[in-house]
Image (spheres, helix red, strand yellow):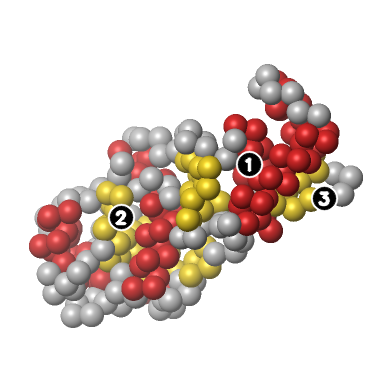
């Protein structure tokens, strides 16, 4: 598990990003004392640093200089400022990438994965775990969890959810779902498919996710992905 140090003083934004990254199997740490960033950096020894520019005590550029004087750990900057010089400055200080706020989480995770693959020559694509609408979907444990709790799914339910989530925001036909379940030696008739999808929705309702599985009459089903854009 990669260790990520998120140097962000906005506690709400920090928690939102931490929850999403934890769902991707990253171990996320924060800073408790912004006058002691280097001490905490040394203690945590992260594999990647994500750092905001506007911070208390000293700005992100200062801490980037300090980190670079001791380590070659990859650094990804976040910034709510729109100064073009911010990106230039961050790169000159040795940052690996830069994201302008507001940003979509998919962009953040893509940049993190690209950096980790490049620096550590490691395939960061999780095999058994995916995130969907802010929830962690574990295909090995057959569970879905978010801040509302956790639900356990049957084999058929997790298999259906897997097919839908892997093609989120796209319609998956009833025929394709049934064929995939047949190929997996779990024959599901058209009526049984409807029952399984309804049971899946009912369980997901406990996590406030049921509405994101939509029925497209005469076509099939679609797993919607809610928008997650961070402005802070």
Q: Residue at x 53, y 42 (%)?
A: 152
User: Which callout, 3 or 1, points at the residue further toward the start of the chain?
Assistant: 1
User: Which callout, 2 or 1, points at the residue further toward the start of the chain?
Assistant: 2
Using the rendered image of the protein, determine whether residue 19 is visible from the camera's viewpoint.
Answer: yes
Q: Which mark is residue 28?
A: 2
Q: Are marks 2 and 1 in contact (CB under 8 Å)?
A: no
Of 87 and 47, nearer the camera is 47
Report the residue marked by disc 3.
216
Element class at badge 3: strand
Percent of width and height locating residue 4: 29, 53
Mark 1 is surrounded, within 10 Å at the Cα level, by few (under 14), some (14 to 19) or many (20 or more) other residues, namely: many
Q: Residue at x 41, y 58 (%)?
A: 19
Question: The C terminus is located in which quarter?
Answer: bottom left
Q: Which of the 4 image quadrants contains residue 8?
A: bottom left
Percent of width and height locating residue 67: 17, 60
* Above or below, comparing residue 80 to residue 42 in the picture: below
Q: Residue furthest right?
A: 218
Q: Residue at x 76, y 46 (%)?
A: 221
**Foreground mark, 2 or 3?**
3
Q: Is residue 201 left or right of residue 28?
A: right
Percent of width and height locating residue 9: 29, 74
Percent of width and height locating residue 119: 31, 42
């Amino acid at each position: 598990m990669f260790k990520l140090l998120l140097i962000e003083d906005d506690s709400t934004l920090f928690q939102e990003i931490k929850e999403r990254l934890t769902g991707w199997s990253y171990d996320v740490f924060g800073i408790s004392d912004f006058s002691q960033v280097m001490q905490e950096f040394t203690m945590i020894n992260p594999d990647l640093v994500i750092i905001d520019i506007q911070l208390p005590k000293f700005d992100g550029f200062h801490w980037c200089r300090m980190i670079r004087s001791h380590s070659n750990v990859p650094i990804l900057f976040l910034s709510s400022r729109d100064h073009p010089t911010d990106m230039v400055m961050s790169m000159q200080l040795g940052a690996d990438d830069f994201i302008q706020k507001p940003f979509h989480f998919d962009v953040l995770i893509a940049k993190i994965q690209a950096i980790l693959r490049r620096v550590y020559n490691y395939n960061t694509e999780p095999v058994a775990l995916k995130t969907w609408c802010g929830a962690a979907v574990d295909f090995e444990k057959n569970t879905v969890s978010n801040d509302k709790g956790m639900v356990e799914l049957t084999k058929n339910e997790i298999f259906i959810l897997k097919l839908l989530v892997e093609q989120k925001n796209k319609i998956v036909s009833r025929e394709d779902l049934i064929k995939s379940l047949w190929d997996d030696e779990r024959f599901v008739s058209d009526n049984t498919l409807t029952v399984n999808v309804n049971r899946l929705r009912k369980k997901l309702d406990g996590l406030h996710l049921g509405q994101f599985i939509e029925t497209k009459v005469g076509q099939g089903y679609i797993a919607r992905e809610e928008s997650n854009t961070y402005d802070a």
